[in-house]
Amino acid sequence: MKTTSMLVRRLCAAAGLALLLAAPALAQTATQTAAQPAYPSQPLKLIVPYPAGGATDSLARTIGQKLQEAWGQPAMVENRPGAGGTIGNGFVAKAPADGHTLLIAITALIQQPPLMDKLAYDPLKDFAPVTMIARSPSMLAVPLDSPAKNLKDFIAMVKQSPGKYNFGSYGAGTSSHIQGALLNMQAGIDLVHVPFQGAAPLVPNLVGGQLASAFIDSATARPHLKSMRPLAVTGTQRMPGLPDVPTFAELGFHSFDPYGWFGVFLPAATPAPVVQKLSDEIDRIVHLPDVSAKIEALGLQVAGGKPEAFQKVVRADAAIYAKIIKDANIRLAQ
């Protein structure tokens, strides 16, 4: 009994000494935790790597306004256009990883690496996906007076006259160019690529019959649907506004599943709790009735979701585009 009592006293003394020695470290940790300001602790910067006025800019300003209202911190949109978006992307990649500098990006972010020899950042390593704001399918469309009434007719028409027909895109290396190259490879046709500087000159040339076809995103096509004939749409489901137009997958083609998307990214080293808090808030924002209405008015589909889900989409789409770009030998001059 005496031996047991002595053992208990020694254990208690040892435990007390351990707590005494650990107390300074525990106090320091508690002090550091308390000293860390709650996120966000300063104004937010939403970097848009394209000029003001486009869909990306509009979405950024809507999200920024709602973040400011919810968190009481200024949320300022900064347009940093140039070099196909790489200037703005690169700025965020090198920004402090504290959650206060956000990138509002589009699908081009993950299409650029296989297109360019030198890129100052790696989209899959230097950014943390936060949330997808919205997504957009694309369509292959022809002029209303085209003899082709469906995709099968169109492919047969092109095959009968090699080198005669073309497809328009928003520019070299854009999604519409990549999709046209993919159709050429899978259908065994030779549509000539005609790149434009964005949607503004592309649509009138398609509607006016100067182009035989074009790949156009749903947001751009929406105001002009009565002036063109969609033959097939990308994505995994038919578009709500075009229930009679089949997907490419339904027609036996593959790798047309990716949607175009608009999403929020942070520098890769941003702490996970910050990424999650921002993701939760933006997911809430995009599902607000007034915000959803604005997104849909742009011809886009409301997205949202958790960082893990967005990261899965980003990585899967990057792999698909990398293979298409390599197989089609698409390169951009730098």
Image (cartoon, rainbow, N blue to C red):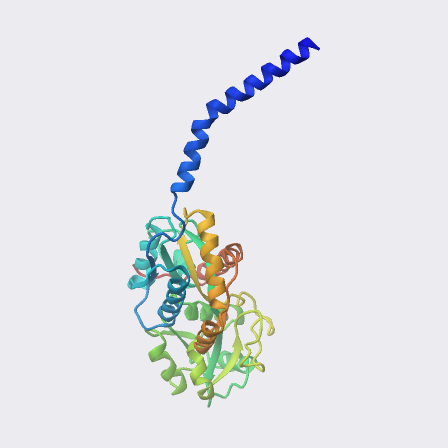
In which quadrant of the rendered image does the N terminus lie? top right
In which quadrant of the rendered image does the C terminus lie? bottom left
Depth check: give the residue in front, 262 or 169.
262
Picture residue at 37% right of the left edge, 67% below the top? 65
Q: Residue furthest top?
A: 2
Q: Is residue 240 left or right of residue 85?
A: right
Residue 13 % position (x, y) = 55, 17
Residue 141 % position (x, y) = 47, 80
Q: Is residue 2 above or below residue 242?
A: above
Residue 246, picture quadrant: bottom right
Q: Is residue 113 above or below residue 241?
A: above
Q: Residue furthest bottom?
A: 145
Residue 179 % position (x, y) = 46, 69
Residue 311 appears in the figure: yes
Residue 330, picture quadrant: bottom left
Picture residue at 46% right of the left edge, 62% below the top? 282
Q: Is residue 177 left or right of residue 183?
A: left
Residue 112 % position (x, y) = 39, 59
Q: Is residue 89 left or right of residue 159?
A: left
